[in-house]
Image (cartoon, helix red, strand yellow):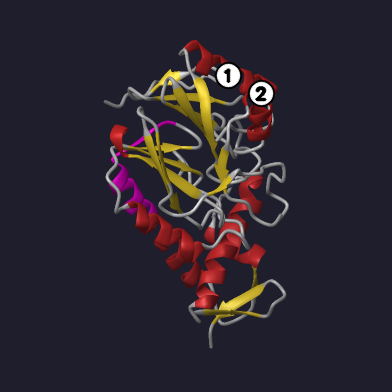
């Protein structure tokens, strides 16, 4: 039984399934949609997925929701260490001492360096209580240390930034790799799920169809890039302008990073070449 709400209000818990509540952080914006979603799994021994940004108000809202349900925090799970997903982990640990599950990466200017997992995740790691069972699935692509968490009993896949509701995910090289991203999307199709619970936005219904559409969208983008690329050198900026027509200026940097991820994939497949100075052309 899965039911979403019509509006997301930061700090107000929404019950989505018998065991899952969502508390959204007050960090809404152009990259974060209505804000980062923190998910609470279970009522007595609560798993907290993606505690969110460093925000006292949000940490208070998480603890309040857990205590209002008569529970305690059992463990903290982090899909990846971007700064809108994991920094509140350290704040929650200070308040409740629960163990953290996650994976870390060398810094690339986008990572939360305060995150220190007690248990390093690996593909297939499963933790169970008498209320829930979560399985970690390694899904590199958005970033290399990205994991999704499968909660089969309630039919949900918690996907962090592997998928977003209403928008496409940014792939930032070098930790973001487009070829890995496509493979990680295909991997999701193997799992039974009734809905995807994204790090930003509402639950995503018809999950298998949406994953297939997302793969098709990425491949279409790659085909367009191949069409716009010539046998002359073109800069990343020129290619971004050619591929993303009419793009909101505020998104230009992130669009060009995603395009760079596509270009790296094409170079690895010997379909494009680079001069090493930010210029690309068709492989000769
Ligand atoms: Zn992210």
Q: Is residue 152 above or below residue 276?
A: above
Rendered location of residue 231, percent (x, y): 56, 82
Magenta stretch holds residue 213: yes
Magenta segment main secondary structure = helix
Give neighbour class at mark 1: few <14, some 14-19, many 20+ (Cα, 10 Å). some
Residues 193 and 208: in front is 193
Count up the numbered dots. Answer: 2
The N terminus - image quarter: top left
Q: Are marks 2 and 1 in contact (CB under 8 Å)?
A: yes
Query: What residue is drawn where x is 46% and y is 13%?
Result: 69
Q: Which label belongs to residue 63?
A: 1
Extreme residue toward the bottom, this view: 284
Residue 39 lies left or right of residue 211; in this view the side is right
Query: What residue is drawn where x is 43% and y is 67%?
Result: 223
What stretch of residues is rendered in magenta?
202-214
Query: What residue is drawn where x is 53% and y is 84%?
Result: 283
Kindly state the secondary structure of the residue where label 2 is placed. Answer: helix
Rendered location of residue 242, percent (x, y): 56, 62
């Amino acid at each position: 039984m899965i039911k979403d709400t019509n509006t997301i209000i930061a700090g107000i818990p929404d019950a989505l399934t018998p065991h899952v509540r969502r508390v959204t952080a007050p960090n809404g914006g152009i990259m974060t949609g209505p804000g980062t979603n923190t998910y609470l799994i279970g009522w007595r021994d609560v798993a907290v997925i993606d505690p969110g940004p460093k925000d006292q108000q949000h940490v208070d809202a998480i603890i309040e929701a857990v205590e209002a349900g008569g529970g305690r925090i059992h463990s903290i799970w982090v899909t990846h260490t971007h700064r809108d997903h994991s920094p509140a982990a350290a704040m929650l640990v200070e308040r409740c001492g629960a163990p953290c599950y996650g994976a870390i990466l060398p810094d690339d200017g986008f990572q939360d360096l305060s995150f220190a997992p007690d248990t390093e995740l690996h593909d297939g790691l499963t933790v169970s209580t008498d209320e829930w069972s979560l399985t970690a699935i390694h899904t590199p692509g958005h970033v290399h240390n990205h994991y999704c968490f499968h909660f089969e009993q309630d039919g949900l896949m918690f996907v962090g930034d592997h998928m977003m509701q209403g928008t496409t995910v940014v792939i930032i090289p070098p930790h973001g790799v487009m070829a890995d991203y496509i493979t990680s999307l295909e991997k999701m199709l193997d799992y039974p799920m009734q809905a995807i619970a994204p790090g930003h936005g509402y639950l995503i219904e018809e999950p298998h169809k949406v994953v297939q559409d997302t793969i098709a969208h990425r491949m279409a983008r790659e085909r367009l890039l191949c069409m716009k690329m010539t046998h002359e050198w073109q800069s990343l900026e020129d290619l971004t302008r050619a591929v993303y027509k009419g793009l909101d200026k505020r998104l230009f940097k992130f669009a060009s990073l995603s395009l760079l991820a596509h270009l790296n994939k094409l170079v690895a497949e010997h379909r494009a070449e680079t001069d090493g100075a930010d210029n690309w052309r068709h492989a000769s």
